[in-house]
Amino acid sequence: MNQEIVAARAQVSTPAQNPFPMQLKVEPREEDQAGFQIKMFTEKSCSGLLVFVLEAFEELGLDVLQARVSCSNNFLLEAVATINNDDQNGDDHNKDAEVVRKAMLQAIQSWSEVSQ
């Protein structure tokens, strides 16, 4: 089974205009399971970013089934989230993965605008 993977390497600017690399990967889960695997990583500690990410999950209507987060010396988030809506088919997963990816990028951008 070949699933399309939506991945991005985002350049996010802090308010001081110092860009730092953020790796973001959003993958649809197996075909028989609605939802996504979401991975975010940066070598920089991002105090407060987790709040913005969780707010984005809530706005998208995603339920987090499992997550691993590290916010001390870097920022690492690995999450498995499901869609509240059970009527998704395989084609919609790819579209929805792009929506989730964009929402994560927006959360990163929003965080970078308020963090100093």
Image: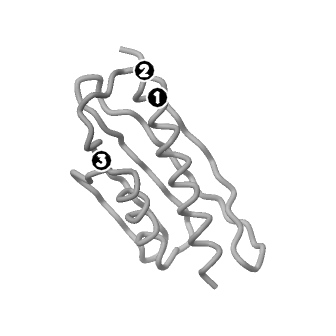
| Vertical comparison of 102 with 87: above or below | below
Q: Label 1: which residue?
A: 94
Q: Nearer the viewer, mark 3 or mark 2?
A: 2
Q: Amino acid at mark 1?
A: Asn
Please give the label number shown on residue 91: 2
Query: Would you call the spot at circle 2 few (<14 residues within 10 Å), some (14-19), or many (20 or more)?
Result: few
Q: Label 3: which residue?
A: 81
Q: Amino acid at mark 2?
A: Asp
Judged left or right of residue 91, residue 102 is right
Instruction: Residue at 23% x, 24% y: name it.
Output: 32
Residues at marks 1 and 3, CA–CA distance in whole angstroms = 15 Å
Q: Quadrant of the C terminus?
A: bottom right
Q: Earlier in the sequence, mark 3 or mark 2?
A: 3
Question: How was this image coloured?
Answer: one colour
Kindly indicate whether the residue at mark 3 contacts the one at mark 1 (C-beta within 8 angstroms). no
| Vertical comparison of 43 with 23: above or below | below
